[in-house]
Amino acid sequence: MEIASYIIENNCTVRQAAKHYGISKSTVHKDAERLPAINSELARQAREILELNKSERHIRGGLATREKYLHLHNAHT
């Protein structure tokens, strides 16, 4: 429940939550699977954020790649 609350409050990704708590991404996913049996409303809110982040991840990846190559290009000129 603590991890789900953190995800909701900070609108963060699985990776960010895992890093904050010092656990693996797999553990965050497993905890998210168990949560509906404990607190269905909290689980629903966390799942919404995680699904949104998942749908946007290709955009963040593209931006990160763009930044990487802009920095490489600027370093060589």
Image: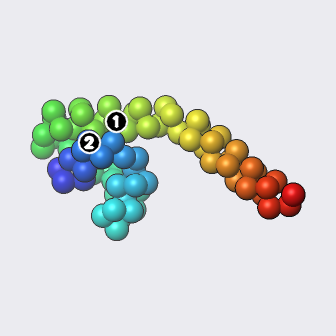
Q: Secondary structure at mark 1?
A: helix
Identify which residue is drawn at 58% across, 36% down.
Answer: 59
Drawn side of residue 47 relative to residue 15, left or right: left
Quadrant of the snapshot with the C terminus: bottom right
Q: Are marks 2 and 1 in contact (CB under 8 Å)?
A: yes
Extreme right residue here?
Answer: 77
Badge 2 or badge 1: first in the primary sequence: 2
- x and y percentages locating residue 67 in the rendered image: 67, 49
In this rendering, the answer to whether 51 lies above or below 76 is above
Q: Residue at x 13, y 40 (%)?
A: 39
Identify residue type, mark 2.
Answer: Ile
The residue lying toward the viewer, choosing from 10 and 44, is: 10
User: Extreme left residue here?
Assistant: 38
Residue indicated by mark 2: 8
Numbered disc 2: secondary structure: helix
Left or right relative to 7: residue 15: right
Q: Is residue 1 visible?
A: yes
- Identity of the residue drawn at 86% across and 60% down: 76
Amino acid type of the residue tagged 1 in the rendering:
Ile
Furthest-bottom residue in this view: 22
Q: Find the distance from the CA under tag 2 to the CA under tag 1.
A: 7 Å
Query: Could you tell me which residue is drawn at 12 percent across and 43 percent down?
Result: 38
- Name the residue tied to disc 1: 49
Query: Is 37 on the left or on the right of 72, as rendered?
Result: left
